[in-house]
Image (cartoon, helix red, strand yellow):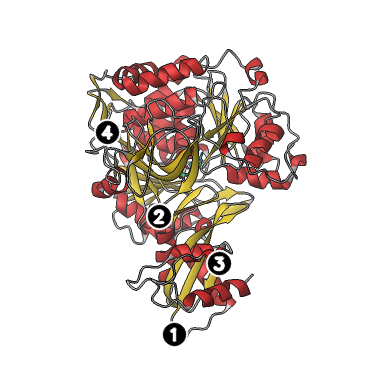
Amino acid sequence: MADGKAPVVAEAHEVDTFHPPQKMLDKHPSKPHISGMDEYQQLYKESITEPDKFWGRMARDLLTWQRDFQTVHTGSLAEGDNAWFLEGQLNASFNCVDRHAIKDPNKVAIIYEADEPEDGRNLTYGELLREVSRTAWTLKQMGVQKGDTVAIYLPMIPEAIIALLAVVRIGAVHSVVFAGFSADSLRDRIIDARSKVVITTDEGKRGGKLIGTKKIVDEALKQCPDVSHCLVYKRTGSECPWTEGRDYWWHEEVEKWPSYIAPEPMNSEDPLFLLYTSGSTGKPKGVLHTTAGYLLGAAMTGKYVFDIHDTDRYFCGGDVGWITGHTYVVYAPLLLGVSTVVFEGTPAYPNFSRYWEIIEKHKITQFYVAPTALRLLKRAGDDFVKAKMPDLRVLGSVGEPIAAEVWKWYFEVVGREEAHIVDTYWQTETGSNVITPLAGVTPTKPGSASLPFFGIEPAIIDPVSGDEIHGNDVEGVLAFKQAWPSMARTVYGAHKRYMDTYLNVYKGYYFTGDGAGRDHEGFYWIRGRVDDVVNVSGHRLSTAEIEAALIEHHSIAEAAVVGVADELTGQAVNAFVAIKDGTEATDALRKEFVLQVRKSIGPFAAPKAVFIVPDLPKTRSGKIMRRILRKILAGETDSLGDTSTLSDPNVVDKIIATVGESR
Ligand code: 6R9
C-alpha cells in the first residue's frame, strides 16, 4: 500500500488510470445502471444536444408528479431566469417518503448511528411517514404557511431529517443552519431568511462532548423579535433555558396530532430550501434551490454516480448543515427509497475505527466522505481499518481535491481494491454532483474528478481575456455553458448578487469560482478556488467574513486573512492583524482574537495562527495585498513579486520577521 511512500508528483499525463474493479462488479446485486462508457457518451450527448427530451424523460422516470409538466425548460444563463418543468406539481416529502411507505412500509429508511455506538435505532419508511406527518401538523399549528421559511438548527439525529421533510410537506422552505455556527451567525441567517419558527434540540452530542444548542439559539433569538415559536427536541434531557409561550417540546407537541397529513402540491419552481454559503464578500449568501429541478439532480446523481440500487444501504458522512448532507444524506437516498445512515458522531470517537465499524455493522454499500476525514484516518494508521466491509461497492469523495496518496489509501486500505472511487466535484450552488465519475462505469485517475455529469457542459476560460479555451491540455477557470435543473435559482433577496457572482462574470456561462485543467483525455482536474474562499476540512469559509469578525474586536485596527496549505485540514486559516496604538501584543491577546472568530462565526472558522504585525501590506489605494501574505507564509520570500506599489514596502520585512519569530 501507499502509506509511508514519498508522494509521487506526476504529470497529469503519467498518472495511472483505474478501471471499475472487477470485484466490484462481481459483488453487484445486479449490474450498474449504465452499461459502460459507450452508453455514458451516448446519454451525455443527448443531454447536451437534446436537453428537453433528455430531462423530460428523466424527470418522469425518477419523480412522482401530482400534475405532469408541459414545458421542460425556459430561460437562459445570460438572463438568469432558468425555470424547469413548468406547470408540473409535486411534493418533495411525498417523493422521499410516501411512495416508498406505500410500497414497503417496513423497509428501513433511516439508520441512526448515535454518538455512542449502542444508542442508535432504525426508522422504517412507514414510521418516517408518521413522524413527518405529525411534525408537519405541529408546524402548521404554529402558524407556518406555504412559502414561509423555517430555521433548523439541529445536530445529526433522525429528527433533522424528519424536520426537513415536515417543512417541505406543508410547502414551507427549510433553512438549515449548521449546528456548529455561533449565535451571531445563526441570528444573521434567521433574520435574512425571515424565519419565524426555529427547530433545535436541548443539547447536541458529538464525539463524547455536549453542545449547548438551545443556549445558542436563545442567545440568537434575543435579537430576532419575529421568531414566534421554537420547537425543541429533547436529546439529552439536561436543563436548558426556556421561554414560556415561545418554546415547545417536540415530544409534547407531536403527540397531539394525527399520523397522516396530505402533502401540499407544489409548483416545480416553488422554493424548496435556502442554504447559506460563503462567498468572496463578508455577508453569507442564502442560496435558493427550487423543488423539481433540485430533486431531479439529487435522484439522478444518486442513481448514476453512486449506482444506488433498491437493496443498498447508503452512508454519507456529511452533516445536514451543509449541502452534502442535504443532497446525499437526505434527498438522494430517500428519493431512491434506500436506507440512509444518519451519523451523529465523529470519525475519531470512540476511536478511529468508527466509520469502518458502522460500515461493517450495517453492511454499507456506498460510503461518501470528505478527504479531510480520510487524511485524519490515514494518519491514525491502517490498524484501525480492520472491519470487514465486503458489501462496499462505491467510495465517494467530496468537498476538496483529494491527493493521489489519499485516493490510493482509500482505494487499497479501505476499499481493498474492490470498490470504485468517485471523486465528485460540485457546490452548494450546483445542487448535485456536476463533474464526477459514474460508479461502475467511468475510468478514474487519482486526483481528477473525471468527466461531466449529464447536462453539464464545462468550459475552461482564460481568466485574463475572458475567452473560452477550446481543446485539451488546457488550464483556466471552470464555467458551465448550459443550464441544468438543479442549479441554484437566486441568492435570497439579492438576485443582483446572484447574477454578478455566477452569471455576469462571463456572459452566457455559469462561473464556478474554481480553477481547473482539462487534460489530454478531456478529464477535469479541479485546482481550487480563485476567489477569497478558503476550504478548511471541507468547510467553505470566506476570508472577508473572518476579517469582519476579527475587526469587531476592540483592539484590532485591521485584519487580513489568508488560507494556507495544511496537511490535515487541506487549508488552514491564518490571520494577520494590526492592533491599535497603545495595545501590547501578547499571547493572551492572540487567544482573544481566535475566540472572537469562534464566537462570531463558529469554532470551525478559528484561525490556526494569528500574527500581530505593525501594519498590513497595502497598495497606495489601500488594497490589502493578500498575495504577499500568502507568499510569506509559504516561505517564498524571494518571489514576492512586485512590491513597489505598496504604500510602505518596509512592512514586508517586518511581517517576514514576525512570521519567522513565531515558528
Ligand atoms: C459539495 C461542496 C464547493 C467548493 C467548490 C470547490 C470545492 C468540492 C470538490 C472540490 C475539488 C472536489 N470542491 N468538491 N474541489 N474536488 N471533488 O463541497 O459544496 O461547500 O459549496 O463547496 O468545494 O472549490 O467550489 P460547497
Q: Could you tell me which residue is drawn at 58 percent across and 49 percent down?
A: 205
Q: Between marks 4 and 3, how big is the CA–CA gap? A: 55 Å
Three-letter amino acid code of the residue under disc 4: Asp
**Disc nearest the viewer among 4 and 3:** 3
Whichever of labels 4 and 1 marks the residue nearer the N terminus, that label is 4
Q: Could you tell me which residue is drawn at 41 percent across and 70 percent down?
A: 551
The residue pinned by badge 3 equals: 638
Q: Is mark 2 within 8 Å of ligand 1?
A: no
At label 3, counting other C-alpha atoms closer than 10 Å, the crowd grade (few under 14, some 14-19, many 20 or more) is: few
- Relative horizontal placement of residue 527, taking residue 80 as reference (left or right): right
The image's mark for residue 581 is 1
The residue pinned by badge 4 equals: 270
Three-letter amino acid code of the residue under disc 2: Leu
Q: Quadrant of residue 188?
A: bottom left
Instruction: State the SS at label 2.
Output: helix
Asked if residue 595 can be seen in this view, the reply is no
Asked if residue 359 can be seen in this view, the reply is yes
The image's mark for residue 186 is 2
Whichever of labels 4 and 3 marks the residue nearer the N terminus, that label is 4
Asked if marks 2 and 4 touch (Cβ < 8 Å), the reply is no
Q: Could you tell me which residue is drawn at 65 percent across and 31 percent down?
A: 359
**Disc nearest the viewer among 3 and 1:** 3
Whichever of labels 1 and 2 marks the residue nearer the N terminus, that label is 2
Above or below, 650 relative to 292: below
Three-letter amino acid code of the residue under disc 3: Asp
Instruction: State the SS at label 1.
Output: loop
**Disc nearest the viewer among 3 and 2:** 3
